[in-house]
Image (spheres, grey):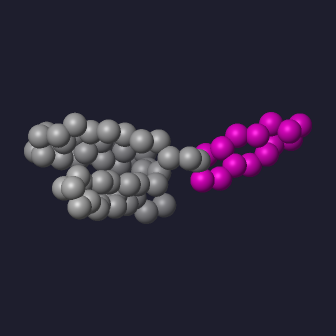
Amino acid sequence: MPDKINVEILEDGTIQFSTDKISAKNHASADEFMAEIEKLCGGVRVVEKRKQKYAHVHAKGVVHAH
């Protein structure tokens, strides 16, 4: 799984990042990167959870999403 952080600068100057899942080995450094960007830009980080992309069904009808 490639670890990617997509960056977009919106017309109002907001810096928007989006990611899919980040691997366990890179998760801490990605969090540190985002915290450093927040500190350098002087703004407040807002995290919006996105809808899950897929779901699957196990035996006996148990369903969960990832």
Q: Residue at x 60, y 53 (%)?
A: 53
User: Percent x, y for residue 5?
Assistant: 34, 58
In which quarter of the view is residue 28 placed?
top left
Q: Which residues are magenta?
A: 53-66
Q: Give the side of residue 39 with respect to residue 17, left or right.
A: left
Residue 56 magenta: yes
- Residue 45, percent from left and from top: 27, 39
Q: Which of 53/12 is in front?
A: 12
Q: Nearer the viewer, residue 12 or 47?
A: 12
| Residue 32 seen in the figure | no
Q: Residue furthest front?
A: 12
Q: Position of residue 35 (x, y in %)?
A: 22, 40
The answer to whether residue 7 is above or below residue 29 is: below
Q: What residue is rendered at 42% in x and 42% in y?
A: 48
Image vertical order of residue 6 relative to residue 31, above or below: below
Report the residue at 56% width, 47% height from top: 51
* Residue 29 image position (x, y, % from top left): 28, 45
Q: Determine the residue positioned at 23% across, 61% down.
A: 11
The reply to whether the magenta stretch includes residue 25 is no
Q: Would residue 37 be found to the left or right of residue 48 on screen?
A: left
